[in-house]
Image: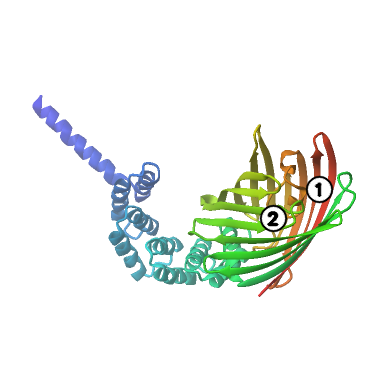
Amino acid sequence: MRTILSLFFVFSSLFFSFAQESQSSDELFSQARHAAFEEKNYPLAIEKSKLALELSPNYTDIRVFLGRVYTWSEDLVSARALFSQMRSEEVADADFYLAYGSLEYWNENSEFALQLLDEGLTKNPKQQDLMLLKAKILYSKDRYEESSGVLLEQLKLDPQNAPARQLLEKVSDFTTKNAVGITYNYSHFDKQFDKDWHTVSLSYKRATPIGSVILKLNHASKFGDQGLQTELEAYPRLSDLFYLYLGVGYSGDVGIFPKFRTGASLYANLPKSFEAEVGYRHLQFNSTVWMFTGSIGKYYKNYWFNLRTYLTPDQNRISHSYTGTVRYYLGGAQDYLGFQIGTGISPDDTRTILLGNEIYRLKTFKLGAEYNFTLSSKDRFSISTTYFNQEYQAGKKGNQWDASIGYSRLF
């Protein structure tokens, strides 16, 4: 009996050994990917990859994958040794250059990463992932003009590349040192007011190493009265992931404008071309209004979708405001058609904050469209129109039509 059991164990070992050896490199590669992505078991993924490479030593996809797993395991010595060997063999695969470039970028060796990406793009001139990583590294190194050039070239090849468009939106704030602008807004009411309103805004934007700073001067006319407001806004960049909005405004003409307005938001650039924001807005008229805001955005092909809410608490309840926005990009970062639908009033809109501190507690429906376009690299124009059906007193509604036109000169 003891002899039979011994023979059984010997044959079982031989059987499992033979089964292991009979597996193809593709089957082992599949098991390695499952171990890495599904189980997060990097040692097992490395073991399976090495077994696969024993069968197929020059299988590029497996070698690149193994280098990536070494990177994820923080075994940088092994990852670099493998990638260096592949580079000496003049492997032309785009995924190889992407993996090797990412390794060096993540470990603060950006210049070498750029060198690798340039090599990869020489062999794969239109490879989108290589172009995007190069643009990200240039952006992180404050080389904004170069980053913008790569992204614009990429969008010519693939206009529906959402990650490239999202990054171009950020880069565009740094590519022009100065911009001056003027915007005129006209508001007409069918019931609420007899006279139309007019608002003119002048702005100066300056790009700094940490983000854009914007100085605005707003002039408004209503009921034959006139008022001025001064605003200062900044968009400091905290990291590749986070940036801020900071704003402050003052006016001595309370009633036409709030005496003070402040605001702050934290923005996050999320994976899968998502972005999110959370913040507050504060307006001081005869009384003080506090609002809290949040938004979620998504780039998808040529589109940008955004949903924003403002929550305004008072003693009895919380007022809700929601706005959905869709943009369809026609080319660069500032060329798009936009559509908007929502309820409530935005405190970030100069033309609507003329309505005073009680408007945020009344019901409003709005529908709008805008068109932003550039005639040259230095001249930008915007046209928009918005329809409001709003409750101007409890139980009383009226219609408002707004139209705006704007121009900016970059230098």
Provide the residue designation for mark 2.
328
Element carrying mark 1: strand
Quarter of the rendering occupied by the N terminus: top left
Q: Residue at x 60, y 72 (%)?
A: 177
Q: Is residue 19 visible?
A: yes
Residue 100: image quadrant is: bottom left
Where's residue 317, x and y in %? 65, 33
Kindly give the residue lying farthest to the top in the view shown. 1
Q: Earlier in the sequence, mark 2 or mark 1?
A: 2
Identify the amino acid type marked 2.
Tyr
Looking at the picture, tell me which residue is in the foreground, 99 or 200. Answer: 200
Where's residue 236, x and y in %? 54, 61
Q: Residue at x 38, y 65 (%)?
A: 108
Looking at the picture, tell me which residue is in the foreground, 194 or 324. Answer: 194
Kindly give the residue lying farthest to the left in the view shown. 2
Q: Residue at x 17, y 31 (%)?
A: 8
Provide the residue designation for mark 1.
387
Q: Is residue 154 visible?
A: no
Looking at the picture, tell me which residue is in the foreground, 51 or 236. Answer: 236
